[in-house]
Amino acid sequence: TMPDEPSLQEARLEMMGLLGPTLFALRGPGSREVEELYAGAFALCQRLQEARSHFPIYWGWWRIARDFHVKQQRADELLQRARRRKDPELLLQAHHCSWASAFSAGALCDCATHIDRGLEIYAQGDFRDHAVLYGNHDAKTCGHGERAFLMWHRGSPARAWSEHRLALAWARQLDHLGTHFHLADMGLVLGFYCRDEAQVLANAVRLIIQAEERGFTDYRARGLIFKGWAQALAGEVQAGRASIEAGLAHQHDTGTYEDMPLYYAMLAEVLLRVGEPDAAAAQLAGARKMLESKGVAIWMPELLRWTGKLHHGAGNSGADPALACFSAALMLAESQGSTALALRARIEAARTLMAGDRLTEASDWLDPALRDHPDERGNPDRDSAEALLKSIRQLLDRGAGA
């Protein structure tokens, strides 16, 4: 009857809010089913008097945005709503979506601020039940996992893995299925950052098996991409390529774009290994255009670096086009606050200059990187930079002696 209609609609919203996070895992956050569910739920919220219980719907409405410019706007709106209500639970989840949006945009400083605020709020209450309402994963686990990424970007893989272990310990206490899957995916990303292909391969295979058992198609697709990259580096290049392409096709079908820069960097590397530099260049160019239009900036310095490597490998136009790409990668990485990606761009530029016997310029590229980069033992990128600079200086000394 008419007097009961608002309460019935509120009950319907509650059911939709519980169903949505499960669909994230089953179909992917960009899938048509998820998009239709949250679009309908958001429209229903607009017809009712705003209530605190609507916030999970607004959070899902943020999550389904395929354009990351729009996603950032929605994250800002959520934060404003939460601040107006001065509600710790809503503020926690507003910071949760804000740190994810900031990371995708390459705003690493903003990402760190939102993580700090979110984890401070989490420590002051009991928010363990939020995982069933917000993205099918726990905010504290996500915060430590995302902070691990920040530590890596700041040049400290050891601190990154320490932060990941904090996330893992909390996830084990919660024993929430969606949180375990979310963190498994984050572990694959961190393993890829560190280029630990053996670890990535083992964990990707495990994720694929578990995702198939549960029917989590989105996580299965992610697992296929990481598995393919690790397979290719282990020598199974064609099988690896097929696995990456299968996973990428699913991500495109569901409009899940946040990790696309990583995936295209993987694909370009594998295409180079099978001797198809033109195909790699085409994939990188298409990916950069698509992702720039959608506002996904994180890892874009690596797409530029790989483009530069392709220019240098072509060998028919000198070093300048490659160096232009490395310079662009360096500027973008520094603007984002990624010491790690800035170092990779400097290493590649120094190698290119060294190959052209431009040793002084090569040294000038590396010196600032090693001064600014954390002096952490066992960091493969720093170790490579130090070894390269040592070789360059030895050649310079020989030239001076001659």
Image (cartoon, rainbow, N blue to C red):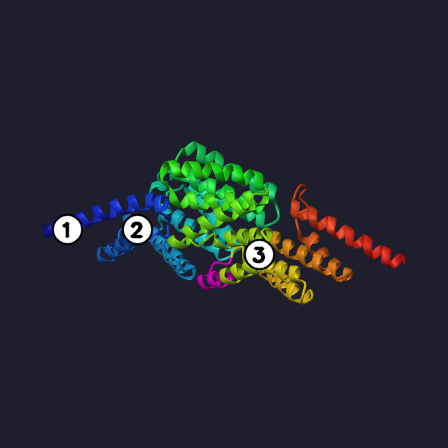
Asked if the magenta segment contains residue 141, the reply would be no
Residue 41 located left or right of residue 327 = left
Quarter of the image where the C terminus is located: bottom right
For residue 5, the mark is 1
Characterize the local packing of mark 1: few (<14), some (14-19) or many (20 or more) Cα atoms within 10 angstroms: few
User: Closer to us: mark 2 or mark 3?
Assistant: 3
Hey, what amino acid is under mark 2?
Glu
Which residue shows up at 26% across the image and 54% down it? 40
Q: Amino acid at mark 1?
A: Glu
Q: Is mark 3 in CB contact (under 8 Å) with mark 1?
A: no
The image position of residue 342, as x and y in percent, is 62, 56
Q: What stretch of residues is rendered in magenta?
A: 288-297
Which is more toward the observer, 391 or 157? Answer: 391
The residue lying at 85 percent from left, 55 percent from top is 397
Q: Earlier in the sequence, mark 1 or mark 2?
A: 1
Tag shown at residue 276 = 3
Residue on which the image places disc 2: 33
What numbered label is drawn on residue 185?
A: none
Q: Position of residue 147 (x, y in %)?
A: 52, 46
> What main secondary structure does the magenta stretch of the protein show?
helix
**Residue type at numbered disc 3:** Glu
Front-most of residues 225 and 363: 225
Q: Element at badge 2?
A: helix
Among numbered discs 2 and 3, the one appearing first in the sequence: 2
Task: Kindly report the distance in space between the C-alpha atoms of the residues bearing marks 3 and 1.
Answer: 61 Å
For the point 38% across and 54% down, which residue is it?
253
Regarding mark 3 in the picture, which secondary structure is present there? loop
Mark 3 surroundings: few (<14), some (14-19) or many (≥20) residues within 10 A: few
User: Residue 214, position in %: x, y?
Assistant: 36, 37
Q: Is residue 83 visible?
A: no
Q: Nearer the viewer, mark 3 or mark 1?
A: 3
Mark 3 or mark 1: whose residue is earlier in sequence: 1
